[in-house]
Image: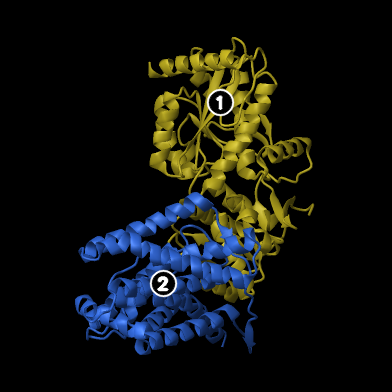
Chain colours: A yellow, B blue
């Protein structure tokens, strides 16, 4: 009941905007997710939740901005089946309880599809709620296993443990190194999950882990002891399944300590260039990241996206932005698959969820299909940072 | 031999961490020794000082020396202002009220920095570069050496200042008995203001060295080192200036050695366990004095 009321309010407000602006026919998706509608057309409201302030703000901002660009593109092209999309985005500061209140707020605002939350912990909390409401949840970047534990939840990014597995395979297959050191954040589920799966895979395929060093969120500025241990162990490659902020400290301190390994990170380390700052850029030379998105890739889709993103936000998009962009296109593709004409149609939620396993989306982060478990299937590649830009591995 | 080498390297890393703690602890202990209050905002003044350097160098394009001076001035003004606005009205209040206020000021400074600078990490400009010294396979970090030297000089200067000058004498008098000092014609308010000015100037120096050593600053930068430095000050005997230096260095070395040889996750627990043991055996801290002359 509440939802219908909210939908009506949204429709009334959109109509008011329409007369107020005096515009006639074109559709406009505007930044910040203001109302957008075609004449007589319906709107699907997509609710995004992510950290826009706080320690992890870069992730939420990137995902939101990437999603906004996709919304704008789809609406400019006339929407899907005559239906346009609208993005509402709430800040959760990467905190699960804040994310749940943001979710409830978005439900009151008439959300039809949830972008879940950008960070894993928040996403798990939101998934719990969305499962009760039965709406489709598609998280751009909630990578922890539990984010997609319910039938209604899917994700764009890889599941955490998969990143560890893919990383080990990638290192082995390309003959990058044999002796591996690991520094990970023991107080962070994300980091622990990847470390575990990396170790398991490494043992299976015969990579040697010479040392495994931990830190916690209480001791994440001084890494001299861990770096010394990696140095003593004679590692050729240092695997860093951690976030960019800590990685920036490790890179600078490793340089001072004279540690000369290859550094290999996963998606959490995306954003390292921004974190480490322009004057330390030299330290990132040769750093490898397992990521499905490289902003300098030369395919038409990426080039167009990067150009639009730079024009709109004066920044280079990272993987989170690409994830956000792909999430919107995936929702649009799923809606197209359902053949419905609006979100109010009977069985919209069920049809959307069913459509997820039937579609193939050719996105920025690869060509994706989904299993009923909510996991995407796409190929993993790595990028190598060269002169401060991501280059696809093998092409740098 | 290899073990020995890595042990020495870990000791040196601990020394580097400890010298930063010592530098911060100096300001803590000095304010406590004289004003008899725990200025929990001390760590955040360090963050403000570091940001002042970043803004001066990166945004205003000023030379390093000017940036350092600006940072010191900003911190001194801020420290005195905090004392005047937040602590002075509570001069007669219970120590607990002052303590809570200090925590409030700490959060206020963090939030203010968060509003102004956002939550992003800022890289600290390379305004001082020190070449490292290599001794037979061992690398001694230039920054560590400089931090240690500067901390030692400041420690001696501070002790001399408090022991030998007229203002220092006034400070000791205020620390012993505010009422009696007032009767002897000493302006308690002025003396405490000077104490905060010096304490904050020390915080600015600490911010400078913290920035140079770790390279990154964010609004929460000051919080954890602030707490650790407080522990260092208690460890060494709060109120005692040489104690702060000794406490800081020991804390850094213990922390780093436990990280290297026991457990990275337990290092903080070990540090605090050592503190508890020291306080059980010697409640006044390593170099604390039993008399009222805690200066």
Q: Nearer the viewer, mark 2 or mark 1?
A: 2
**Residue A164 at x, y percent in the picture:** 57, 52
Q: For residue A298, what is the image quadrant?
A: top right
**Residue B168 at x, y percent in the picture:** 35, 83
Q: Secondary structure at mark 2?
A: helix
Residue at position x 51%, y 51% in the image: B116
Task: Reply above or below: A393 against B186.
Answer: above
Q: Residues within 10 Å of mark 1 (few under 14, many from 20)?
A: some
**Residue A266 at x, y percent in the picture:** 60, 52
Q: Is residue A382 left or right of residue A195?
A: right
Q: Is residue B57 left or right of residue B47?
A: right
State the residue in front, A237 or B75: B75
Quadrant of image for the C terminus of chain B: bottom left
Which chain letter goes with mark 1?
A
Which chain letter goes with mark 2?
B
Q: For residue A65, what is the image quadrant?
A: top right
- Mark on residue A34? 1
Say if mark 2 contacts mark 1, CB within 8 Å.
no
**Residue B19 at x, y percent in the picture:** 47, 79
The Cα atoms of the two marked residues, 2 and 1, are separated by: 51 Å
Quadrant of image for the N terminus of chain B: bottom right
The residue at which mark 2 appears reads as B197
Residue extending farthest top? A40
Q: Is residue B294 left or right of residue B257?
A: left
* Any part of residue B275 in sight: no
Q: Secondary structure at mark 1?
A: loop
* Any part of residue A85 in sight: yes
- Mark on residue A371? none
Q: How many marks?
A: 2
State the residue in front, B34 or B251: B34
Task: Reply above or below: B62 against A340.
Answer: below
State the residue in front, B133 or A250: B133
């Amino acid at each position: 009941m509440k939802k219908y009321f909210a939908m009506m309010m949204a429709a009334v407000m959109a109509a008011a905007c329409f007369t107020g602006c005096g515009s006639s026919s074109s559709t406009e998706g505007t930044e910040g997710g203001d109302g957008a509608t075609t004449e007589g057309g319906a709107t699907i409201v997509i609710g995004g939740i992510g950290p826009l302030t706080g320690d992890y703000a870069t992730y939420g901002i990137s995902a939101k901005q990437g999603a906004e660009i996709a919304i704008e593109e789809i609406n400019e092209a006339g929407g899907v089946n005559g239906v346009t999309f609208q993005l509402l985005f709430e800040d959760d500061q990467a905190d699960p309880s804040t994310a749940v209140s943001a979710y409830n707020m978005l439900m009151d605002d008439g959300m039809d599809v949830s972008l879940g939350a950008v960070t894993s912990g928040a996403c798990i909390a939101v998934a719990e709620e969305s499962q009760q409401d039965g709406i489709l949840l598609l998280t751009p970047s909630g990578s922890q296993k539990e984010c997609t534990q319910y039938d209604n939840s899917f994700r764009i990014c890889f599941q955490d443990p998969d990143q560890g597995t893919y990383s080990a395979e990638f290192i082995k297959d390309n003959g990058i190194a044999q002796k591996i050191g690991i520094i990970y954040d023991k107080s962070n589920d994300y980091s622990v999950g990847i470390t575990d799966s990396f170790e398991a895979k490494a043992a299976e395929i015969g990579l040697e882990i010479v040392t495994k060093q931990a830190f916690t969120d209480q001791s994440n500025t001084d890494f001299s002891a861990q770096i010394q241990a990696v140095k003593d162990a004679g590692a050729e490659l240092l695997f860093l399944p951690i976030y960019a902020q800590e990685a920036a400290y490790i890179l600078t301190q490793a340089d001072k300590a004279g540690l000369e390994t290859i550094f290999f990170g996963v998606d959490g380390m995306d954003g390292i260039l921004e974190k480490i700052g322009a004057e330390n850029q030299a330290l990132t030379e040769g750093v490898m990241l397992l990521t499905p998105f490289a902003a300098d890739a030369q395919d038409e889709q990426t080039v167009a996206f990067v150009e639009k993103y730079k024009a709109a936000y004066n920044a280079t998009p990272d993987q989170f932005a690409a994830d956000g962009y792909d999430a919107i296109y995936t929702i649009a593709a799923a809606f197209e698959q359902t053949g419905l004409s609006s979100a109010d149609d009977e069985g919209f939620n069920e049809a959307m969820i069913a459509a997820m396993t039937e579609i193939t989306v050719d996105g920025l982060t690869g060509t994706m299909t989904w299993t009923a478990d909510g996991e995407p299937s796409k190929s993993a590649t790595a990028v190598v940072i060269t002169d401060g830009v991501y280059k696809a591995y093998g092409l740098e | 031999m290899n073990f020995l080498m890595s042990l020495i390297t870990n000791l040196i890393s601990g020394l580097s961490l400890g010298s930063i703690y010592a530098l911060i602890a100096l300001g803590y202990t000095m304010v406590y020794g004289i004003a008899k209050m725990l200025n929990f905002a001390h760590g955040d003044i360090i963050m403000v000082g570091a940001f002042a350097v970043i803004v001066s160098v990166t945004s205003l394009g000023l030379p390093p020396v000017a940036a350092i001076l600006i940072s010191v001035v900003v911190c001194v003004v801020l420290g005195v202002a905090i004392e005047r606005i937040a602590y002075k009205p509570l001069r007669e209040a219970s120590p607990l009220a002052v303590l809570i206020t200090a925590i409030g000021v700490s959060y206020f400074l963090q939030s203010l920095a968060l509003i102004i600078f956002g939550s992003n990490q800022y890289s600290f400009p390379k305004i001082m570069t020190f070449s490292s010294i290599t001794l037979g396979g061992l690398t001694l970090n230039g920054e560590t050496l400089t931090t240690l030297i500067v901390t030692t000089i400041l420690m001696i200067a501070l002790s001399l200042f408090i022991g030998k000058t007229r203002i220092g004498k006034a400070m000791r008098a205020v620390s012993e008995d505010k009422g009696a000092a007032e009767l002897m014609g000493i302006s308690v308010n002025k003396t405490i203001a000077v104490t905060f000015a010096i304490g904050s100037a020390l915080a600015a120096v600490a911010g400078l060295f913290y920035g140079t050593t770790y390279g990154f600053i964010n609004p929460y930068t000051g919080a954890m080192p602030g707490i650790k430095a407080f522990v260092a000050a208690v460890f060494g005997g709060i109120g005692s200036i040489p104690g702060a230096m000794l406490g800081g260095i020991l804390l850094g070395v213990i922390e780093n050695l436990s990280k290297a040889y026991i457990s990275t996750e337990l290092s903080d627990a070990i540090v605090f366990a050592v503190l508890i043991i020291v306080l059980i055996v010697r409640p006044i801290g390593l170099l604390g004095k039993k008399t009222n002359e805690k200066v």
